[in-house]
Every structure is written in C-alpha cells, then in structure tokens.
Amino acid sequence: MVFGKLPHYASLGQAIASIFGNNVTVAEAKPAFGGDINKSYRILLTDGSHVFLKANQKGRASFFMAEAAGLSAIAKTRAIGVPKPLCTGEDCGELGGAFLLLECLASGGRAADYWGTFGRQLADMHKAKTEGFVEGGLFGFFQDNYIGANKQANAAHASWASFFRDCRLKPQLMQADRYFGAGDRKQIGRLLERIPDILEEPKRPSLLHGDLWSGNFMTGADGKAWLIDPAAYVGHAEADLAMTELFGGFHPRFYDAYREAMPMQPGYEKRRDLYNLYHLLNHLNLFGGAYLPAVQAAIRKYGR
C-alpha cells in the first residue's frame, strides 16, 4: 500500500475529539444534497471549523474505507484536487451509522479556461506513475471497492483486456442474467470472446477515477474542478473518457485540452461503447429495466 491507513473510530464524537480536540463537538449539521446512496451533511464544529460527513447504515464502513483509499490515491498523483479524507467510523448517532469524515470544500465560481484546465489535469492524473497501486500486475487496485452501491472487483491482471473482461463485464453480466434471453446470452458469449480483439492495451497504465460523470466533480474555491466519489483503479485512460461521454455534461474544450496533453490511441470511438456497457450494466443492476434496451444495443454491437 502506498499511503498510510486512515484512522477509524467507534463514533463521530470520538473522531471529532481526536482530530480537533477534546472540547470540540458538533454545533450544527446541515443536510447536503446530490448523492443517492449516502446521507451527506456539512458539519459546523464548536471551534468554528467545518467538515463534510457522509453516512450510511451500520456495517457499511468498508464502503467508506474504499472511497477514502480512492481519494488518497488520486491525491498522491498531485494532478487534480480531491477532498482530504480525515477518518472513517462505525456510528455517527442520529445522523446515521457508518461514516466518512472529509475536508469540507468551499465552492466558488469557475476560473478562466475552467474546462481546459480540467482536461489537462485529468490527463496529468492519467500520466502519473501507478507503481504501488497494484500488487502482482499492471491493472487493478490494491483492494476491491465499489461502483455506486455495487461491489467492484480489482484483482491484479497483466492484461487490460483480461482485467476488463473478468473484473468489469463478467460480474455485472452475471448479476444481470435474469434480464437476458437465449439470444442475448449467445451474443454475450461472443462479446466476451472478442474482447482481446476489440480492446487495445494502453501505452501506460493509468490511475482512473472510475466513475467520472458530471455529478462526481465540483468547483472549488480555487475555481478549478475537484474530483469526488471515486471508484478508483488502474486501467486504460480511455475508460474514464468514455464515462464522461455516457451522460454528457462535459464541454468540448475539456476534450480538446485532454487530447492536447495526452493524445488518444487510434480507434477510441470504436471502443467507447464497450467501456460504457460496464456502467450501463451497473445501472441496470442497481436501478432496473429502464437501462435494458441500451445494454442490449451495446451487446448486439459487440457480440455480432
């Protein structure tokens, strides 16, 4: 592991006392909106400082430990801003159960060339060294984590194609099997066989955010984009770029600046929808059949 273990506490009160001092307590907790998995709060402490709290049911501490590890990995690249994780814990009382305490980011207006800076910073993150994030291979992560509320396997692989097949598509396809008929399953079989022929091995492994849609970045007080809610792992940079295109919300200047800083390998557009099949399957498994037509269209495209 490339960074120290985050402190873990039995309760929110214990965490605040340990980090901020024995006389410091919660003065006010204001709900924050935007997520659909966790409860979130902006916390004012009695010493006048602020922290950000994410809470979920008891027993979900591992969920927050994984998120903190992803944030710490991105921070280690020194390429783009992320909120600093302070600690995890088991019980935050009336605010919820398991929790993650984070630096509370102040928001601001967007700086000049906001999207260009964002694109260059993401490219810098993708160009950063990945040694230490994966043990026993080039692709994966030092621990499993989550994509939304679903578990995400990160076992080390020497090949990007085999990692994407075995740790991304196969688990989601197995979970979604009840939605598929015989024809779908036949095409899925062909798709999985063809993955080594479809995907290109990257020139270098990249640390990925892993869930890079428009809801998972915010504008900080410095006027730049800051990444939040990662599902981090080491993979092909194309997978992050593909996710930004799935639901939209990224300005063309972002892509131009990214490509100037880190040129794409030829044929990305032919691979993009295969990367996004992973996220569509995850949405199908989490939110239901409304995503089935898009999933089936991608399966037909690559499983012919």
Image: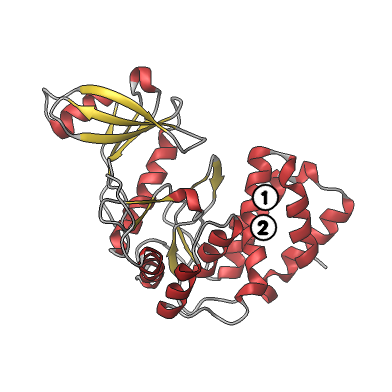
Image: 110 above or below 56? below
Q: Check contact, mark 2 vs mark 1: CB within 8 A.
A: yes
Say which amino acid is labelled 2: Leu
- On the rendered structure, is 190 left or right of 122? right
From the top left corner, tell me how far across and down residue 136 is, in percent: 44, 64
Residue at figure coordinates x 11%, y 24% from the top left:
22
**Dot 2: within a 10 Å radius of its alpha carbon, few (fewer than 14), some, or many (20 or more) residues?**
many
From the top left corner, tell me how far across and down residue 144 is, in percent: 48, 49
Asked whether residue 144 appears in the rendered view, the answer is no
| Residue annotated with mark 1 | 281
Identify the secondary structure beneath mark 2.
helix
Image: 59 above or below 149? above
| Residue annotated with mark 2 | 277
Residue at figure coordinates x 59%, y 54% from the top left:
247
Residue at figure coordinates x 40%, y 23% from the top left:
96
Q: Nearer the viewer, residue 163 or 239?
A: 239
Say which amino acid is labelled 1: Leu
Dividing the image into 4 quarters, which one contains the N terminus? bottom left
From the top left corner, tell me how far across and down residue 157 is, in percent: 53, 65
Dividing the image into 4 quarters, which one contains the C terminus? bottom right
Q: CA distance from mark 2 to mark 1?
A: 6 Å
Q: According to the image, what is the colour scheme of the structure?
A: secondary structure
